[in-house]
Image (cartoon, rainbow, N blue to C red):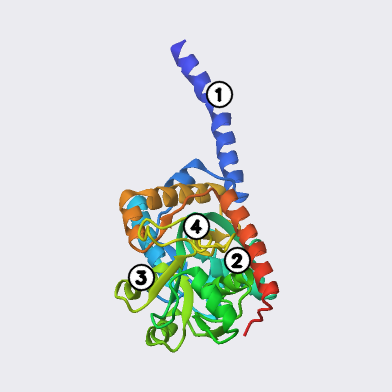
Amino acid sequence: MPFVHNMNIVALSRPLACAIRQLLVVMLIFGLPLTTRAQSYPTKPVRLVVPFTPAGTTDLVARLLAQKLSEAFGQQVVVENRPGAGGAIGVELVARAAADGYTLVMGHIGTFAINPALYPKLPYDPIKDFAPIGLAATVPNMLVVHPSLPVKTVGDLVSLARSKPRQLNYGSGGIGAASHLAMELFKLLTKTDMQHIPYKGAGPFLPDLIAGQISLTITGVPSLLPSVQAGRLRAVAVASAKRLALLPDLPTIAEAGVTGYEATQWNGVLAPAATRPEVRTRLQNAIAAAMQSEDSRAQLAKMGGVPMTSTPEEFSAFIKTEIGRWTKVVQAAHIKPE
C-alpha cells in the first residue's frame, strides 16, 4: 500500500508541474514580472548618461551617485558623458535605448524643464518617453557680482539696474541655459532690464566675469564658490528657498526682498518609458539610500548641494510642475532659441 500511495502522489504532481511550466512560459512571453528577475537586477554594468561635459554640477552629482550604486549593486555603474544640443543628444539616446534598466539618464532642470519650455520640437518627449525613477539632489544657484560693482545686497543691485537700464550685463551658459532663465526670472520679478551675454557654458563666461568684462551672473554654487572664497567675485545672495549651511550669513534672494524668487538646479534619474516597475522600484530604493548616506551628504554639502529623495510618482509630478513654471518665464521674457 505504501507503494501505491507514493505512485498516486507522483501521478497527481505531474499535472501540477505541467501547469507551473505553462504559467512560467506565459509570464515570459508577455513580459510579466518574475520575482527572481527583480532580485537579480542588475546582472551587468549599468550606463548612467550625463548629457553634459565632465566636471559640471550634473556630472559631479552623477559620479557620486554612480559610485554608491556600484557598491550597492555589486555591478559597475558607469557615467557616460554625451553632451551636445543643450543636453538633447544624451537625453534622446536614453529615450531610444532598450527599456531594461541598463541605460539611465541623469535628468536636469535644463533638459527636462527648460528645454521643453523653450523648444517646440525636441527629439524626445520628457513625459511620454521616460519613466522617472527619483530625485537625487538639488544644487542652488548664487547671485554674484564683480567686486568693482558698487553692489553688496540685492537691494543695491536692483537700485543700480533701475538707474542704468541695459547698462549692466550678465553672463550665462547660453540662451535657454539654467543660468539664463534664473536671471530672467530675477529681472521679471524686480522689473529691471539688464543685458544678456550668452556663452557656450559656465566655464567660458567665468573668466570674463572675474576679469570684469561682464558684471554679474546667477549660476550654480559649485562653479562660483572657489572664486568667491578667493575674493575674485562677491556673493550677494543664494537663489534657494533656504539659506545654505555652507554660507549661513548669505541671505536668499527672496528674503532680501524679491518675494517668490527661487531658482535651484536639480538632478534626478530617469529610465526609458517601458522599464519594468520592479526594476524602477529597485533603482529608486538604491538611489534614495545612496544619496541619504552620511558621506554623500558630506560631499554634497561641500558644493552647497542637498540630497533629495522622491517616489517615481512624485518626481513625475515635479517635472510637470517645473515645465509649467519655466514655460511662463520663457513666454514672459520673450526668449527665443538660437
Task: Please name the residue shown 61% across and 44% down the image.
Answer: 26
The amino acid sitting under disc 4 is Gly
Task: Please name the residue shown 40% across and 71% down the image.
Answer: 235
Query: Considering the numbered disc 1 on the image, is that residue within a helix, a strand or a loop?
Result: helix
Residues at circles 3 and 2 in contact by the CB criterion of under 8 Å: no
Question: Where does the image place residue 285, in percent across and percent down from the top left?
Answer: 45, 47
Query: Considering the numbered disc 4 on the image, is that residue within a helix, a strand or a loop?
Result: loop
Upstream in sequence: badge 4 or badge 1: 1
Judge left or right: residue 36 versus residue 176. left
Q: Residues within 10 Å of mark 2 (few under 14, many from 20)?
A: many
| Image depth: mark 2 or mark 4 in front | 2
Question: Where does the image place residue 185, in percent across and percent down from the top left?
Answer: 60, 70
| Image depth: mark 1 or mark 3 in front | 3
| Image depth: mark 4 or mark 1 in front | 4
Upstream in sequence: badge 1 or badge 2: 1
Residues at circles 4 and 3 in contact by the CB criterion of under 8 Å: no
Measured Cα–Cα span from mark 3 to mark 2: 25 Å
- Residue matched to label 4: 101
Residues at circles 1 and 3 in contact by the CB criterion of under 8 Å: no
- Residue matched to label 1: 12
The amino acid sitting under disc 3 is Leu
Please identify the quadrant where the C terminus is shown: bottom right
| Image depth: mark 3 or mark 2 in front | 3
The answer to which of 158 and 225 lies nearer the viewer is 158
Whether residue 89 is visible to the viewer of this picture, yes or no, is: no
The amino acid sitting under disc 2 is Ala
Query: Considering the numbered disc 3 on the image, is that residue within a helix, a strand or a loop?
Result: helix
Measured Cα–Cα span from mark 1 to mark 2: 60 Å
The answer to which of 8 and 122 lies nearer the viewer is 122
Upstream in sequence: badge 4 or badge 3: 4
